[in-house]
């Protein structure tokens, strides 16, 4: 019974029971920015209108919108970064594979420059 409910150092935190905040890319930042957006929007609405219940509704809506907005932005950037990494990895592999052969693009450039002179 001592181990149940205790937070272990290596154990991840699951938001709503299914979103593993530690292992899913962009989830931690999305939750943090969502919390900040919730605070700003809820407090701003409360200061403007002094309506508590409505301000809580705005805060929840602000959390959802900010979290989902940053999630999409972050995942798009992560996908772009992975595409660039894959292209770079393939380019490096091709460079190693073709270096010194007749298919080497650097060798073909040097050959065309010599013929132009």
Image (tube, rainbow, N blue to C red):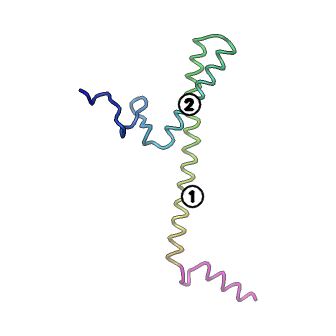
For residue 64, the mark is none
Residue reaching furthest right?
Answer: 117
Q: Is residue 13 above or below residue 51?
A: below
Query: How far is mark 1 from mark 2, CA to CA?
Result: 28 Å
Q: Is residue 38 left or right of residue 22?
A: right
Question: Magenta segment range?
Answer: 99-117
Q: Is residue 96 above or below residue 77?
A: below
Q: Which residue shows up at 49% across the image and 76% down it?
A: 97
Residue occupied by mark 2: 34
Asked whether residue 93 is drawn in magenta, I would say: no
Q: Which residue shows up at 40% across the image and 33% down it?
A: 14
How many neighbours does mark 1 have within 10 angstroms: few (below 14), some (14-19), or many (20 or more)?
few
Residue 35, quarter of the rendered image: top right
Q: Position of residue 112 (x, y in %)?
A: 69, 84
Residue 116, quarter of the rendered image: bottom right
The secondary structure type at the circle numbered 1 is: helix
Residue reaching furthest left?
Answer: 1
Q: Is residue 101 left or right of residue 8?
A: right
Q: Which residue shows up at 63% across the image and 19% down it?
A: 43
Q: Position of residue 83 (x, y in %)?
A: 54, 56
Q: Is residue 17 left or right of residue 42?
A: left
In the rendered structure, which disc, 1 or 2, sits on the residue that comes first in sequence? 2
Q: Which residue shows up at 56% across the image and 80% down it?
A: 103
**Residue 112 vs residue 45, the one in the foreground:** 45
For residue 84, the mark is 1
Asked whether residue 106 is drawn in magenta, I would say: yes
Q: Is residue 4 above or below residue 111?
A: above
Q: Position of residue 17 (x, y in %)?
A: 39, 30
Screen quadrant of the N terminus: top left
The secondary structure type at the circle numbered 2 is: helix
Q: Position of residue 38 (x, y in %)?
A: 58, 25
């Amino acid at each position: 019974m001592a181990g149940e409910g205790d937070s272990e150092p290596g154990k991840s935190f699951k938001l709503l029971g299914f979103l593993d905040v530690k292992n899913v890319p962009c989830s931690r930042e999305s939750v943090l920015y969502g919390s900040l957006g919730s605070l700003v929007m809820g407090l701003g609405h409360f200061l403007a209108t002094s309506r508590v219940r409505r301000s809580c509704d705005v805060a929840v809506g602000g959390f959802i919108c900010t979290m989902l907005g940053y999630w999409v932005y972050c995942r798009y950037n992560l996908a772009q970064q992975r595409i660039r990494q894959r292209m770079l990895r393939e380019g490096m592999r091709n460079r190693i594979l073709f270096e010194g052969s007749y298919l080497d693009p650097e060798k073909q450039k040097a050959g065309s420059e010599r013929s132009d002179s």
